[in-house]
Amino acid sequence: MRIFNPSFGMAAAGPAKVTLQPVNWATDAIALISNSKPNARELLEGVRAMLGAHRPVDNIHFHAKNSASQPAPKELIEKVAKNYKAALLALGD
Amino acid sequence: MKDIADQEVIDIGDMDVEAFNEYANEQGWGDGMPLFVPTEAKVAKFVETVRGDNRPYPPVPPRQIVPTLQSLAANAVMAGCKPEYFPVVTAALRGVLDPDYNLHGTLATTHSCAPMVMVSGPIRHELNINCGTNCFGQGRQANATIGRALGLMLLNVAGAKPGEMDRSTQGNPAKFTFCFGENEEENPWTPYHVQRGFAPTDSVVTVMSGEGPHNLNDHGSTTGDGLLTTFAGGMSNPGSNTIYGKGPMFVIIGPEHAATLKRDGFTIESIREELWKRSRVHLSRVSRENLVTYETTGHKPDGDWLSIGRDPKDIHITVAGGPGKHSAFIPSFGGTTVACTRIAR
Amino acid sequence: MIATETFKPLVLAQAKARKVEPRLIVVKHPVGGLNAEELRERIEAATKGLTEATGK
């Protein structure tokens, strides 16, 4: 007996291949991005404070989605891509 | 679940229904209830019913694959649909693929949301969809299997496997199926799909990522004003996603409550305005920690009150159900929309 | 990305669908609902994970 596969589908065209730039985690600017769930921001604040023992933190900046239930807006993604070589995301679940 | 490299057609040999169910569950294709076998012949009958709808499907998030009509039909067959239900199911799928529906978020969330499917227009009677007594419950093949087919598509095509991509903390029985029809015949105002700009003769599917129906019992009130006090009290919930994430919600008014509201001069618009004002949540009912969260995510209170949506238009209203003094409140996931799709015929 | 052990399968499934390979720092579950004292352990674990992952 032959059946149709209910999970079959064609692969969507993938995103363009991104070439990552080398990051110096001791000096480069870092974007800290919260998924806007409670404690994600607090977790990142704590990490930032602890990093302060090893590196400057005035170029480590906080960003967040508008809502925990919505995807990150395109403008935020573009802003982070344009201004940072490194990003650290936290899920506050 | 195996990935897109899978064959579209699989030769499963000489299996009976029980063996097929074992096999399907091993593949992760099932929702826990028995499945029908998606044979080539059955799938072909379903595909024939949507030949008039040639619009391509976009990649389905979160899994990001583009389904074929055959793979979609296989899910409808497995759910127990009749072939003539398939255009309703595909219209519902197109609705949840509206970018503003936020399918990725609604499937991966810890919230309990499930796709609410409401059918409007002549097709309700053609397919024997229950719009009256027990419309949210068991008893009709169309209600039971149309909602189930959409759920299976979201499992198998979208990839919403519980515990992996579907992270709902507790889930919701509506994830098995949640499909009903509007009771247009006992709606003293305008049917929902007409409110949304469709013709009364159009058949339309409306989807919203919602919780199950919350009952609004009012046997005592004899006025529309009294009913709205009860409705608003039931909606005013500091634990709802619509206060946390803001977004749409449905109030499905039972026909007897609707008749009382109409008698007292209320319209859809005035009901919406009254419910918006009266369903606000007083800050004394919200925890201090949650208030901090709401403020930091841009949901500041208005004086001593928090609203349960963005504005009165977030409250969607229609009529369904049968005799009795009950209505229902269906809050949504929050970050989603109410999407309507005309059924291609 | 900092995620809890419980949500690691979701992150991996979504990354696979989007054909990306995030560098994951996994901490104990949960993060939400913890008080400041409880969260301290997650902050230390995340910082240790970041330091190890970035070689600093």
Image: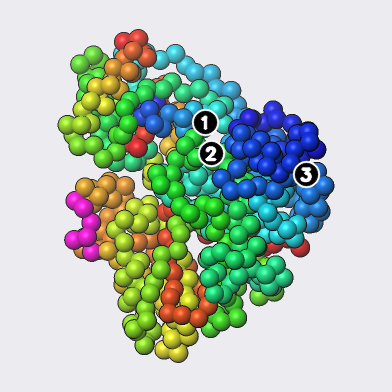
* Residue at (45, 90) in percent of width and height: B263
Task: Locate residue B315 relative to residue C29 in the image: left or right.
Answer: right
Q: Nearer the viewer, residue B43 or A80?
A: B43
In the picture, the disc for residue B161 is 2
Question: How far apart are the two marked residues, 2 and 1, measured between alpha carbons?
Answer: 10 Å
Q: Can residue B277 be seen in this view?
A: no
* Residue at (58, 72) in percent of width and height: B131
- Pointers 2 and 1 within a single chain: no
Contact (Cβ within 8 Å) of mark 3 with mark 2: no
Q: Quadrant of the C terminus of chain B?
A: bottom right
Residue type indicated by callout 3: Thr
Magenta part of the chain: B282-288
Local secondary structure at mark 2: loop
Q: What is the x, y in percent for residue B193?
A: 60, 69
The residue labelled by disc 1 is C13
B330 within the magenta span = no
**Front tag of 1 and 3:** 3
Residue type indicated by callout 1: Ala
Residue type indicated by callout 2: Lys
The residue labelled by disc 3 is B39
